[in-house]
Amino acid sequence: MKRIQPAQWTIQWTRLHLTDRSIMKKLFVFVLLAAVAAPGQTQKTDPNPFGKAKAPPSAAAGDDSTLKVDVKLVSLFVSVTDPRGAPVGDLQKENFSITEDDVPQKIAVFSRESSVPLSIVLAIDTSLSTKKDLPVELVSARKFAHAILRPTDTLAVYKFSEIVTQVVPFTNDMQSIDRGIDNIRVGAATALFDAIFLGSQALDKRQGRKVMVLITDGGDTASQSDYKTAVRAAQEAEALVYSVIIVPIEASAGRDTGGEHALIQLSEDTGAKYYYASSMNQLDEAFRKISDELRTQYLLGYYPVKRFADSDFRQLEVTVGGNSSLHVRHRTGYYTAKSSW
């Protein structure tokens, strides 16, 4: 075999180096990319950038004193009325103050809610005790549905006697709603708390503002759920529960005042309101006031500055400064974890 002299070897290597310079560049780029993609060095994109907050970068990995918190926007709908009960709709963000468990919070979201879609559960008591007044209730309920619904809103109709039945699923089709209301018939007993519980579960899956309107005389004789379970379901769903309490005869010996008080407390705890009605005109007026209020609510949102892991329920308070005569209503609090029903 012919041997290559040193001088010849140098010339040939130089030619090879000059000829294949592009190959070397490609090889260098390949090696660089391989190094970047090596295991343990790959950068991954967080699939949920708005999820749980991470510990501060300065915290040591093994420091047991580091507190990790779940930072979640808390939102609540607020109704403000004047001394005559009329809605007040011209307030600004700076008029409001929020505390959670007596700790002041910074308002991060503020808006007027007249255009936010509504999901409404209209639950009608069809027990035997409402037999005389049911036709009037149904006529008034139909008027309410026609007055409140816009193309972006939906309404579901429930009836409850000894059982709870969804008569019409969530829809904004007025013909379906009218047919459902027309087909409601009288039952026997009253499963009021079950109606609140099941209606709240249905609302929990909805977006936007969630409202339940109960038309009932306040009695409960057949529910499997108790009052506390029903209230918690409504609070977890962030539902406003308006109670329209039917009182045919004011001094009736069969009147369930305990049930009425339970409904009043439920409405107050969820940030809604209760109304008494004993005639068509009073029913229509109650529905009109509910409709007006839902068009003049405020949405307030904040990120809690302080949380305690051992607390399941957080107490909320909203105040309006500068005018002590205004009445402010909102849900009284929220649960940090939902029940496993």
Image (cartoon, rainbow, N blue to C red):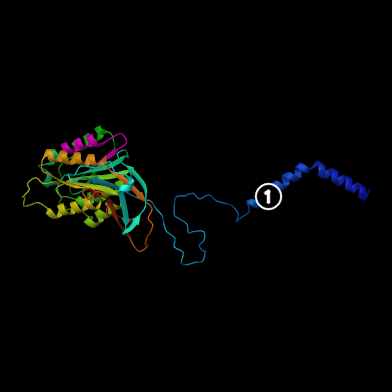
Q: How many labels does the image show?
A: 1
Q: 110 or 113: which is nearer to us?
A: 110
Q: 20 or 102: which is nearer to us?
A: 102
Neighbour class for label 1 at 10 Å: few (<14), some, many (≥20)?
A: few
Segment colored magenta: 138-156
Residue 106 in the image, given as x and y percentages of width and height: 37, 52
Check the picture and name the quadrant holding the C terminus: bottom left
Which residue appears at 20% of the width and 42% of the height? 86
Left or right of 38 on screen, residue 45: left
Residue 139 part of the magenta segment: yes
Look at mark 1 in the image and give the residue it sits on: 32
User: What is the residue that sits farthest to the front in this orientation?
Assistant: 322
Q: Tell me which corner region of the image, top left, top right, bottom left or bottom right, holds residue 15.
A: top right
Residue 117 part of the magenta segment: no
Which residue appears at 87% of the width and 45% of the height? 12
Q: Can residue 239 be seen in this view?
A: yes
> Mark 1: which amino acid?
Leu
Residue 71 in the image, given as x and y percentages of width and height: 41, 55
Secondary structure under tag 1 reads: helix
Left or right of 186 on screen, residue 321: right
Q: Can residue 167 be seen in this view?
A: no
Residue 100 in the image, given as x and y percentages of width and height: 32, 57
Left or right of 21 on screen, residue 87: left
Q: 269 or 260: which is nearer to us?
A: 269
User: What is the residue that sits farthest to the top in this orientation?
Assistant: 175
